[in-house]
Image (tube, rainbow, N blue to C red):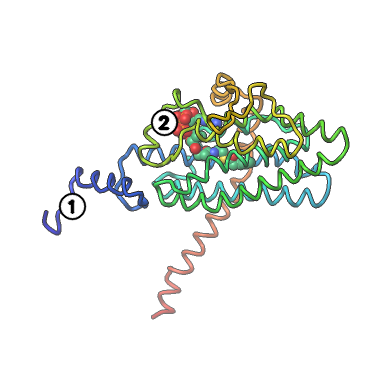
Amino acid sequence: MTETEAPGADALQEYFDATIARDQRVEPRDWMPEGYRKTLIRQIAQHAHSEIIGMQPEGDWITRAPSLRRKSILFAKVQDEAGHGLYLYSAAETLGADRDDLTERLITGRQKYSSIFNYPTPTFADVGVIGWFVDGAAICNQVPLCRSSYGPYARAMVRVCKEESFHQRQGYELLMTMMSGTEGQRAMVQDAVDRWWWPSLMMFGPPDDNSPNSERSMAWKIKRHSNDELRQRFVDMTVPQAEHLGVTLPDPELRWNEERGRYDFGTPDYAELMRVISGDGPCNAERVTRRRTAHEDGAWVREAAAAHAAKHTARHTGPDRTEAAA
Ligand code: FAQ
């Protein structure tokens, strides 16, 4: 190959494969197979949408939080989720995805977001249980993504995980406080645990033998562990926390398996997961409608920001500046 000759498709593929094999990062300007790019855009976009839609269930409690302290904690937490969405949309943009297009796909139901955010939050204990279970599940799933093969995604995950870890503790602390309260408060916590346990296990996706994307994503080192492995880690992590808190996890099959050194547990209702993913969960319509309305209501902000940016660009590149420089 001469110096000016571009490398052929085989050489590019070989270089990419070697990068993955050596556990090095793929960066935005590197050549990558189209399937790898598409898989990443799919996963990162769904992840970003989940963070943004995920602001709603807890956000509903901001005005009703029982004290100023709880209100400000919740406010900060929900705001963090917006930040996670932004890092993730930016990571998707490095792959050539268009932010407007991704938003459009979300609000027209053409792109997915996590099933977990389609469940209602009728009591304040739900805020605590979301922090404990949902952020806990997010940590199990996302800590390995800090070693994902795509650089911008992996780096975004580092900060996201640090914040999720704080979120999980705030949820657990809220529940500890409620558990040391009245009989009514303890019952409220147990009720929220009963409602969120199974949907939280479903967050990890379908079982391995019915997970069409896992094998490819793991070969590309986008995903580092299978859905079932991560679900198991979550159960193993959460059971001792439940015992310490004094709540019962609603699974009669849950028990320590001495031989495996892990907990055995029951099978989540995967038919329910599929229903929720396909748009038929308790709150799907409400969540998407609210997102669509917020997007439409925000049109004037986007227009104003674009006009401001255009004015700024004109001021710094226009004739006045050229003359001044001359
Ligand atoms: N919900 O072949 P697989 C958070 C879809 S962030 C909806 O196993 P894959 C922070 C899947 O996309 C939570 N859809 O797929 C927070 C695929 O559909 P497609 C979000 C699901 O990608 C906390 C099909 O089923 N986290 O919680 C779900 O290999 C508190 C077949 O599945 C992430 O996105 C589901 N649960 O594995 C915010 C983490 N499960 O696209 C606010 C990154 C599966 O082929 C408050 N994502 N599907 O049509 C991942 O790790 C993976 O994408 C999985 C799915 C594990 C979610």
Residue 295 at least partly seen: no
Q: Amino acid at mark 2?
A: Asn
Disc number for residue 6: 1
Q: Position of residue 40 (x, y in %)?
A: 41, 41
Residue extending furthest toward the right: 182
Residue behind label 2 places its C-beta within 8 angstroms of ligand 1: yes
Q: Nearer the viewer, residue 300 or 49?
A: 49
SS for dot 1 = loop
Percent from the top left, x then y, of residue 67?
83, 48
Which of 123 and 290 lies nearest the eye of the viewer? 123
Location of the C terminus by quadrant is: bottom left
- Along the line of sight, which residue is nearer the eye, 27 or 265? 265
Horizontal side of residue 193 vs 149, given as left or right:
right
In this picture, residue 257 sits left or right of residue 177: left
Q: Is residue 44 above or below residue 201?
A: below
Name of the residue lying farthest toward the front: 259
- Amino acid on which the number 1 mark rests in the picture: Ala
Give me the C-alpha separation between circle 2 and circle 1: 32 Å
User: Which numbered dot is residue 65?
Assistant: none
- Mark 1 Cα shell of 10 Å, populated few (<14), some (14-19), many (≥20): few
Q: Which residue matches tag 2?
A: 213
Instruction: Please give the name of the residue rendered at 15% of the width and 58% of the height, measured from the top-left corner.
Output: 4
Q: Residue at x 34, y 37 (%)?
A: 35
